[in-house]
Image: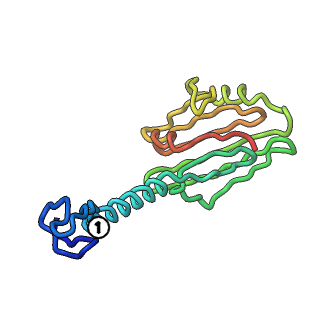
Amino acid sequence: MDGYCEKCGVKLKENAQYCQKCGAEVSKKTNFKKYALIIAAVIIIAGIAGSVTLLLNQTQVVKVDNVEFEIPSDYVNDPSRTEVSHDQNVKSSAMGWSNDKYYIEIGVTRTPGEGINSKEVAAKLGGSPTKMFGYDGYYQKYDEKSYSFIFGLKDEVCMIYVSDYDAFSDVKVLGKV
């Protein structure tokens, strides 16, 4: 240790445990300045890593008719939205979102009250029976890179169309509002 005695001020010998002049015990202070740069760098790196993780994992809640879905925040809403009223009772709504890799379109057809059997309608639309998003429904493959999943949700028939099968993992069905 290269320092001075806190009691009498004499220069201490290296690694001294006691002052050679007054006999005072030498303080074992850690040289904080020596480690300050390393500590600051670790804190900054941890902060950046946490911020990047938070930004990459952000989601947005989107609402199609009265059903909510969750998709990653990097998806941008396609300005084309369709609202179709087949008659006074049956209404359809569809919206689309895209990011740099995928396109997702979600459609909801509903009737007020319990006017349709949504599971029966989904079955008539065809496809392979399967379970996705926690719902029994029908999976369809249109070409090499586009797919849909159609399922019933009370008095709604929901259709999730994706441009690539992997985009299904970007969607979470939250349910009716």
Q: Quadrant of residue 114?
A: top right
Q: Is residue 143 left or right of residue 84?
A: left
**Residue for point 49% across, 41% down:** 146
Q: Nearer the viewer, residue 156 or 120?
A: 156
Q: How many marks?
A: 1
Please, which residue is most extreme toward the top here?
A: 129
Q: Determine the residue located farthest toward the bottom in the rendered image.
A: 9
Left or right relative to 154: residue 145: left
- Residue 122 picture location, percent across and down: 67, 30
Identify the residue at horizontal 50%, vertical 40% (top origin). Answer: 169
The location of residue 19, given as percent across then percent down, is 19, 66
> For the point 56% across and 54% down, which residue is it?
97
Q: Which residue is mark 1?
A: 37
* Amino acid type for the residue under numbered disc 1: Leu
Q: The C terminus appears in which quarter of the rendering?
A: top right
Q: Nearer the viewer, residue 120 or 69?
A: 69
In the image, 130: left or right of 164?
A: right
- Position of 72 relative to 112 (above/below): below
Q: Nearer the viewer, residue 135 or 151?
A: 135
- Location of the N terminus by quadrant is bottom left
Secondary structure type for disc 1:
helix
Colouring convention used in this rendered image of the protein: rainbow
Residue 13 figure quarter? bottom left
Q: Residue at 67% of width from left, 27% of height from top?
A: 124
Q: Is residue 174 left or right of residue 34?
A: right
Q: Percent x, y for residue 170?
A: 51, 44
Residue 113 drawn above or below residue 13: above
